[in-house]
Image: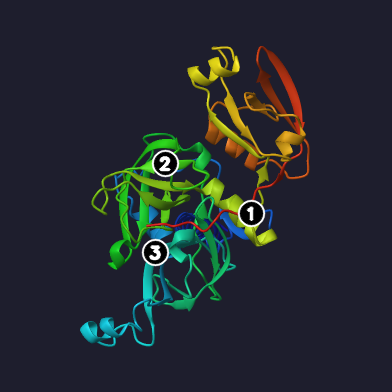
C-alpha cells in the first residue's frame, strides 16, 4: 500500500511539473485562455493578472513564447513605367522596365492571432499589393489573402491556409503603465526575426498625423523599417500592440516608436471578420481646440472645458439635431471630451442609426441634443512613406 501511494505521489508530481512547463511556454497546447471573439474568431487570451518580471533579468522565455507567431511579410506589385515607351529613354537606358512595367517589392511583419489563420499587420504593409507571401519562423511559406483593411487605424487582416499555426496570446493593453518593460519582435531591414527590448515611454499618443484614429503606445524598444506590423509584447510574451511607425530623421530607430494597442486591433479584427469592414459613427462637424480667441468670438465662458464646433455639415446628423457653429461639446453619451481627438473617437464609437445624447454649451447655457449618427465615410487611400 505504501509503495502504491509513493508511485501515485510521484506521478502527480511529474504531471504537475509538466503541466506548469507547458502552460507557461505553450499555452495553446492546452487551449488555456482560449476564447472566441464577438465575430467568432478563436483567440488565446492571457490571464487577467499581469505577468511577473523575470527573476534572472532574462526575457528569453517571453521571446520564445511570442516569436513563433510573428511572421515576415513580403509583398509585390506591378508598377507601370511611364517612360518605358519613350524612345529617348530606351536609347540612353536600354530596355529597362521590361514590357512597360516593373515589380516593386515590400517588406513587413505580421502577427498570427488565431489558429484559424488570421494575421494582424499594418495596412501600409500590404496596401496595393498584388501578391502577399508570409514566412513563418519554422520556414513554412504561404500565400496570404487580404480579409479586410482599416486605413483609419492603419490595420489589415490577412489569412493563410496552414495548419498547426503558432498563435500569440493576447494581453490587456488597457493595464499598461509608463515604465513597463516591453519587447518588439519583427523583421527589420529584412535581416531576419529580431527581438529588441525597452519600456513604455508614453500612452495615448495622438495628433501625430499618422492615422485618423490615434491612441499609440510609445516605446523606446528599437523599431526599424520592416518592423511594421510586428508584435509589441509584455515580459510574459503576451501581445500588447502592433508596431506601426517610428519617429526618425535618418530612417533608423531613434528610440521613439509607436504601436497600436491590441484593444484597438481586436475591435478591428472583429468588425472586419464579421462585417467585412469597420463601421464607425459620423455626425458631420469640424471640431477645434477651444482657444481663448474662439471662446471670446463665440461668447463662451473661459472656464469651459470641451471641444468647440467651428463647422457643421449641411443636412448632416449634427445639423439635423440642431447643433451650430460655436457650440462646445462637453459630453457624448455621458463621456466627457476635452480634445478634438477624444471627440472624434467618441463619435466613431457610436452606433449609426441609434440616438446619442450630446451635452453642449451654447453661450452661457447648457443644451442637450439627441443626435442620430450616420456611417463615417470611407477615407481616401492613404499615402505612406
Query: In this rendering, which labeled residue sits more in front, label 2 or label 1?
Result: 2
Question: In the rendered view, does 141 fall on the left or right side of 274?
Answer: left
Q: Quadrant of residue 315?
A: top right
Front one among 312 and 370:
312
Disc assigned to residue 208: 2
Q: Secondary structure at mark 3?
A: strand
Residue 213, image x, y percentages: 53, 44
Question: In the rendered view, does 300 fall on the left or right side of 57?
Answer: right
Crowding around mark 1 (Cα neighbors within 10 Å: few <14, some 14 to 19, many 20+) is many
Q: Secondary structure at mark 1?
A: loop
- The numbered mark, 2 or 1, whose residue comes first in the sequence reads 2
* Residue at the image position 63 percent from the left and 54 percent from the top: 278
The correct choice, above or below, for 140 with respect to 270 in the image is below
Residue 208, image x, y percentages: 42, 41
Look at mark 1 in the image and give the residue it sits on. 278
Disc assigned to residue 108: 3
Viewport quadrant of the C terminus: bottom left
Is label 2 in contact with label 1 (beta carbons under 8 Å)?
no
Amino acid at each position: 500500500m505504501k509503495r502504491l501511494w509513493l508511485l501515485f505521489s510521484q506521478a502527480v508530481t511529474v504531471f504537475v511539473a509538466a503541466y506548469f512547463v507547458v502552460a507557461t511556454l505553450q499555452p495553446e497546447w492546452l487551449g488555456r485562455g482560449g476564447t472566441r471573439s464577438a465575430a467568432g474568431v478563436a483567440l488565446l487570451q492571457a490571464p487577467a493578472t499581469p505577468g511577473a518580471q523575470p527573476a534572472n533579468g532574462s526575457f528569453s522565455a517571453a521571446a520564445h513564447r511570442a516569436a513563433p507567431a510573428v511572421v515576415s511579410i513580403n509583398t509585390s506589385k506591378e508598377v507601370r513605367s511611364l517612360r518605358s515607351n519613350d524612345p529617348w529613354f530606351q536609347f540612353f537606358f536600354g530596355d529597362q522596365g521590361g514590357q512597360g512595367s516593373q515589380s516593386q517589392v515590400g517588406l513587413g511583419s505580421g502577427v498570427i492571432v488565431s489558429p484559424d489563420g488570421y494575421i494582424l499587420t499594418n495596412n501600409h504593409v500590404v496596401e496595393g499589393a498584388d501578391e502577399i507571401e508570409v514566412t513563418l519562423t519554422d520556414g513554412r511559406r504561404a500565400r496570404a489573402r487580404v480579409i479586410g483593411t482599416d486605413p483609419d487605424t492603419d490595420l489589415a487582416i490577412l489569412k493563410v491556409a496552414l495548419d498547426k499555426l503558432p498563435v500569440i496570446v493576447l494581453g490587456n493593453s488597457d493595464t499598461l503603465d509608463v515604465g513597463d518593460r516591453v519587447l518588439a519582435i519583427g523583421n527589420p531591414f529584412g535581416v531576419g526575426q529580431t527581438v529588441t527590448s525597452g519600456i513604455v515611454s508614453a500612452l495615448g499618443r495622438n495628433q501625430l498625423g499618422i492615422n485618423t484614429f490615434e491612441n499609440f503606445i510609445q516605446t523606446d524598444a528599437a523599431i526599424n523599417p520592416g518592423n511594421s506590423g510586428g508584435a509589441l509584447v509584455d515580459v510574459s510574451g503576451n501581445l500588447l500592440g502592433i508596431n506601426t511607425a517610428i519617429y526618425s530623421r535618418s530612417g533608423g530607430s531613434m528610440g521613439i516608436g509607436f504601436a497600436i494597442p491590441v484593444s484597438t486591433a481586436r475591435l478591428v479584427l472583429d468588425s472586419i471578420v464579421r462585417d467585412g469592414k469597420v463601421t464607425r459613427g459620423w455626425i458631420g462637424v469640424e471640431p477645434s481646440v477651444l482657444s481663448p480667441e474662439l471662446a471670446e468670438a463665440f461668447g463662451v465662458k473661459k472656464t469651459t472645458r470641451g471641444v468647440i464646433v467651428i463647422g457643421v455639415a449641411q443636412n448632416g446628423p449634427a445639423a439635423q439635431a440642431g447643433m451650430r457653429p460655436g457650440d462646445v461639446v462637453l459630453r457624448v453619451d455621458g463621456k466627457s471630451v476635452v480634445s478634438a481627438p477624444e471627440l472624434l473617437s467618441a463619435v466613431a464609437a457610436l452606433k449609426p442609426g441609434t440616438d446619442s445624447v450630446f451635452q453642449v454649451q451654447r453661450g452661457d447655457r447648457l443644451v442637450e441634443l439627441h443626435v442620430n449618427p450616420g456611417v463615417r465615410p470611407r477615407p481616401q487611400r492613404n499615402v505612406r512613406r
